[in-house]
Image: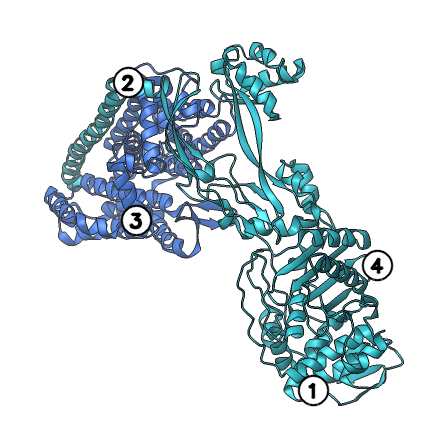
Chain colours: A cyan, B blue
């Protein structure tokens, strides 16, 4: 230790010297800050003091007005209403209770309420305004402003509140707005505004960028009482754009009532085949969007969000269902295209189908006997399509399903949109880590097993079969949508499937007979999936609307639901001036007509 | 080799727990309590006279950390020395991971989530850098300190985290690393000619640094030079903060009477801009007292460092003191508009768990160094 002590001593001396130097730098740094504070607080007090005290310059951010949401004919589904509220600032009022008692001559305030407001104001800082009442009428505001000189600290202000005029029938499509949860962007002063609302679901969320607009600023001079003395500079906010939807709100309301009355959980989608426009997108049960916009309590929100029948879920785009027998139209088209089935070929159904030791039963236990494709679609024979799917293989089957729009999302404006599932061996290996089994191809062929689709996808699939074109759904109404590109399937093959669907509704004993609209009305073509699902389009010859209905719970028939909705749609079109292309209900297509009458 | 080094300074008989507690520099901890108390009072005022949502949590957080400081003080110095390099490497690895695993907040990725805890690796790095540099100079024989290769090595220790934090981008932390690292090298005895050379190189390379900055960083510097060009963004922060300070005047408006802050004119008033609230409510006098308390704390810690013989202990304490100084200086300089808005809180006063943890663990390290780094009886 003695050897190193000299070096240590030198080291320690150097450390002390340098510590002193560093300490000097630090002292200089703090001194600099101190001098700066002296400059700001002592020398600058006369400059900054008045800014804060007497005539405060206040730069206020002004929230933009949110754009409206309209239906296809311009009916307003969502807009903004002005609500007035009144606040009191204790520092200015001095005697809060006394001022409030004077206010109670204008507003109905009980002594109890006044006591509560006084207690609340006492807990806050004296300069923080406390809300006295909201939802004031215009007269009340006018009276308050008239009496302002005798009511120090009282301030009236107005805010815009979202209003939903479509009711619960449109709640899922239109969606709702809510507060900004956290400041997403560092310098986004507009998002920080307490009254700022952003889309949380439905079109409010999907078109939020269009609806929101851009904030403005207002530079104002405020006096010692916090009142605005004058406006110095105003940069107006840019209002959000109005968004016009393809939805027919009147029709949707009819559909909504029909859904509510018949089933505890159901969805229906009606698509305009020419434009892809979604005319109806209904989901039941729903909720009251006005209650959410008006400020819902946490307890009520929890009840809504955790309710077993999921009223917040838009089943039309986010409900994923096994398509069942509605899927056989895909299997049929794929088989015809692949050449493993010819339109005239007959297959015998004995009521069950055996495949590698497994037995698949048909819905008709005694069997359908010998069937053509036409009859198999019409009578919904599972055995027929098991055989066809076995010949086809999963690769060609899943390719056709995708070509018809299953497994896809279109990003048309609802972020709730789910993709459903078109299974194939790659998907199974990746997600379930096991090999594809031959029997699963059969299950897929009759719409069971892993395959899932949303009602919207089923409607789009139907529209694509009806038109032979690659229809893409739209929610925002746009002009000049040119025709969609052809799907690339042989017209003869697609037509064979269409004929089968027409027969299912219109021929004696067809499995979808319930969907027939009635004498003198347009002819419907369609396909059921048990009693819980229906896809179809009308009129059969010159397709205009494609529909998909799904009954998730309740004992309503999906085909009857579709019939009523299509009847509503036909009535609406007739009212609109009879420009509808249907030709009066007489179908010229051979033997179908004879049995339809 | 390390054992030999330890034996050269370690005391002949091991310290008992009561000795250790006796050796703790309690006035320093008392000063820290005073600062946390100022924080609690200000947070109470900012939330309009309520312990919620900030004041109560701030107090609890500080008390927990105070317990940790005392506990850390009883841990032998060898433990921290052995931990120094691994901690540095771990912090470096986490900094490097941020771009991939980090969660984005406010336009920059700085946080890492591990289970329910999320923290900023750059905060951990502030501690690790002090420990690693102290550890480096502890082992380096004094005659080698001035050799170029031994000047380069600590520069690399500083440079790598600086580079990584610039990528995030977190300019404030990068500046802090540079200042902290250079201060420690200076204290360790690196010859002054290197600092002169470094200064010249920095001035020459300023244009390159400017072109390498992110747009938002450039904008902050530009806004700093001319606050009027962005009245709603960071220029707004500075302008409103200055008005709050100026409105406070010499005597201040009194506790809970600040209108600028109470009326929400000052953003981030409970975190980075809390000093403007203190300045408005307690005036220039209050700010002088606040600066004096910080100066006292830093001075006491620098004196603590002088009383240690162990070089690791000296540098660890001085490093911790310098961290305090840098936080205080950059925060007050930011609030008064002397430097651009960099996002550095006021130590122990601002609300926020990460900086409190960093500073208190640094204090714990310094306290352990002080307890164990002195010969018996001193």
Task: Mark 3: give few (<14), some (14-19) or many (20+) Cα within 10 Å.
Answer: few
Frontmost of labels 3 and 4 is: 4
Q: Do the residues labelled 3 and 2 touch (CB within 8 Å)?
A: no
Mark 1 lies on residue:
A391
Question: Where's residue B294, x and y in %?
Answer: 30, 26
Q: How far apart are marks 2 and 1 (CA)?
A: 90 Å
Q: What element carries label 3?
A: helix
Q: Is residue A448 in sight in this rendering?
A: no
Mark 3 lies on residue:
B215
Residue sitting at 66 percent across and 81 percent down?
Answer: A334
Q: In which quarter of the image is residue A176?
A: top right
Q: Distance between the residues labelled 4 and 2?
A: 78 Å
Going from N to C along the chain, the mark reached first, 4 or 2, is: 2
Mark 2 lies on residue:
A45
Going from N to C along the chain, the mark reached first, 1 or 4, is: 1
- Do pointers 4 and 2 mark residues of a single chain? yes
Answer with left or right where residue B199 lies relative to residue A119: left
- Do pointers 2 and 1 mark residues of a single chain? yes
Task: Mark 1: give few (<14), some (14-19) or many (20+) Cα within 10 Å.
Answer: some
Q: Distance between the residues labelled 1 and 4?
A: 36 Å
């Amino acid at each position: 230790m003695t050897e190193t002590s000299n070096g240590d001593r030198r080291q320690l001396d150097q450390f002390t010297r340098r510590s002193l130097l560093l300490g000097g730098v630090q002292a200089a740094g703090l001194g600099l800050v101190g001098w700066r504070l002296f400059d700001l607080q002592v020398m600058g007090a006369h400059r900054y003091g008045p800014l804060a005290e007497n005539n405060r310059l206040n730069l206020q951010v002004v929230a933009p007005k949110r754009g409206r949401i309209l239906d296809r004919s311009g009916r307003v589904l969502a807009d903004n209403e002005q609500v007035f509220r009144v606040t009191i600032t204790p520092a200015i009022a001095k005697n809060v209770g006394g001022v409030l008692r004077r206010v109670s001559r204008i507003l109905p305030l009980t002594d109890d309420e006044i006591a509560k407001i006084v207690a609340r104001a006492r807990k806050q800082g004296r300069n923080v305004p406390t809300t006295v009442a909201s939802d004031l009428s215009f007269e009340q505001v006018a009276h308050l402003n008239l009496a302002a000189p005798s009511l120090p600290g009282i301030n009236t202000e107005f805010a815009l509140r979202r209003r939903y005029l479509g009711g619960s029938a449109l709640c899922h499509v239109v969606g709702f707005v809510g507060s900004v949860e956290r400041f997403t962007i560092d310098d986004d002063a507009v998002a920080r505004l307490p009254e700022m609302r952003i889309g949380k679901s439905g079109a409010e969320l999907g078109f939020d960028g269009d609806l929101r607009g851009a904030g403005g600023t207002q530079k104002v001079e405020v006096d010692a009482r916090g009142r605005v003395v004058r406006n110095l500079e105003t940069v107006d906010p840019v209002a959000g754009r109005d968004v016009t939807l393809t939805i027919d709100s009147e029709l949707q309301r009819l559909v909504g009532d029909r859904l509510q009355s018949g089933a505890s959980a159901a969805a229906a989608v009606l698509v305009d085949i020419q434009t892809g426009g979604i005319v109806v997108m209904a989901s039941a049960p729903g909720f009251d969007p006005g209650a959410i916009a008006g400020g819902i309590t946490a307890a009520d929100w929890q009840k809504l969000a955790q309710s077993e029948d999921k009223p917040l879920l838009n089943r039309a785009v986010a409900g994923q269902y096994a398509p069942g027998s509605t899927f056989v139209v895909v299997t049929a088209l794929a088989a015809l295209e692949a050449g493993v089935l010819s339109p005239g070929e007959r297959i015998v159904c004995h009521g069950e189908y055996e495949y590698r030791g497994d037995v698949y039963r048909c819905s008709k236990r005694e069997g359908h006997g010998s069937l053509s494709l036409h009859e198999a679609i019409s009578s919904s024979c599972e055995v027929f399509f098991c055989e066809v799917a076995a010949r086809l293989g999963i690769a060609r089957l899943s390719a056709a399903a995708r070509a018809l729009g299953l497994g896809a999302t279109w990003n048309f404006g609802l972020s709730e949109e789910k993709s459903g599932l078109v299974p194939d061996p790659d998907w199974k290996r990746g997600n379930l880590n096991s090999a594809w089994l031959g029997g699963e191809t059969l299950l897929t062929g009759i719409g069971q097993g892993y395959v899932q689709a949303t009602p919207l996808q089923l409607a789009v699939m139907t529209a694509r079969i009806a038109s032979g074109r690659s229809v893409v759904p739209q929610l925002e109404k746009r002009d000049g949508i040119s025709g969609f590109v052809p799907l690339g399937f042989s017209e003869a093959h697609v037509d064979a499937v269409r004929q089968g669907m027409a027969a299912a509704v219109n021929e004696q004993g067809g499995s979808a007979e319930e969907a027939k609209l009635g004498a003198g009305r347009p002819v419907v073509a369609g396909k059921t999936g048990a009693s819980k699902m229906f896809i179809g389009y009308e009129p059969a010859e010159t397709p205009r609307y494609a529909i998909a209905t799904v009954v998730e719970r309740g004992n309503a028939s999906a085909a009857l639901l579709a019939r009523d909705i299509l009847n509503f749609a036909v009535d609406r079109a007739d009212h609109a001036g009879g420009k509808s292309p249907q030709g009066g209900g007489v179908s010229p297509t051979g033997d179908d007509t004879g049995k339809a009458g | 080799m390390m054992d030999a080094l330890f034996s050269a300074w370690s005391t002949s008989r091991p310290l008992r727990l009561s000795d250790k507690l006796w050796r703790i520099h309690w006035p320093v901890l008392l000063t820290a309590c005073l600062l946390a108390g100022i924080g609690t009072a200000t947070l109470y005022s900012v939330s309009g006279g309520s312990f919620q949502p900030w004041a109560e949590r701030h107090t609890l957080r500080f008390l927990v950390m105070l317990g940790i400081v005392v506990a850390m003080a009883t841990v032998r110095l060898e433990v921290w020395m052995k931990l120094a390099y691994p901690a540095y490497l771990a912090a470096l690895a986490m900094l490097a991971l941020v771009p991939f695993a980090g969660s984005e907040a406010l336009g920059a990725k700085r946080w890492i989530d591990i289970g329910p805890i999320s923290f900023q690796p750059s905060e951990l790095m502030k501690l690790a850098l002090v420990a690693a540099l102290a550890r480096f100079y502890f082992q380096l024989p004094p005659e080698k300190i001035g050799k170029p290769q031994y000047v380069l090595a600590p520069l690399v220790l500083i440079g790598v985290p600086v580079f990584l934090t610039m990528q995030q981008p977190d300019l404030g932390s990068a500046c802090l690393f540079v200042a902290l690292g250079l201060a420690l090298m200076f204290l360790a005895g690196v010859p002054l000619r290197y600092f002169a050379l470094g200064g010249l190189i920095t001035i020459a390379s300023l244009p390159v640094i400017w072109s390498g900055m992110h747009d938002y960083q450039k904008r902050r510097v530009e806004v700093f030079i001319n606050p009027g060009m962005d009245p709603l963004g960071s220029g707004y922060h500075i302008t409103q903060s200055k008005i709050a300070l100026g409105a406070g005047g010499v005597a201040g408006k009194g506790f809970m009477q600040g209108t600028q802050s109470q009326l929400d004119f000052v953003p981030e008033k409970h975190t980075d801009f809390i000093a403007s609230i203190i300045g408005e409510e307690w005036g220039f006098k209050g700010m002088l007292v606040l600066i004096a308390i910080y100066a006292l704390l830093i001075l006491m810690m620098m004196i603590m460092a002088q009383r240690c013989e162990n070089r690791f202990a000296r540098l660890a304490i001085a490093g911790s003191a310098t961290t305090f100084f840098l936080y205080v200086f950059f925060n007050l300089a930011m609030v008064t508009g002397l430097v651009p808005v960099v996002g550095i809180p006021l130590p122990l006063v601002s609300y926020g768990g990460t900086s409190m943890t960093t500073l208190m663990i640094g204090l714990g390290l310094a306290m352990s160094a002080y307890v164990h780094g002195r010969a018996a009886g001193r």
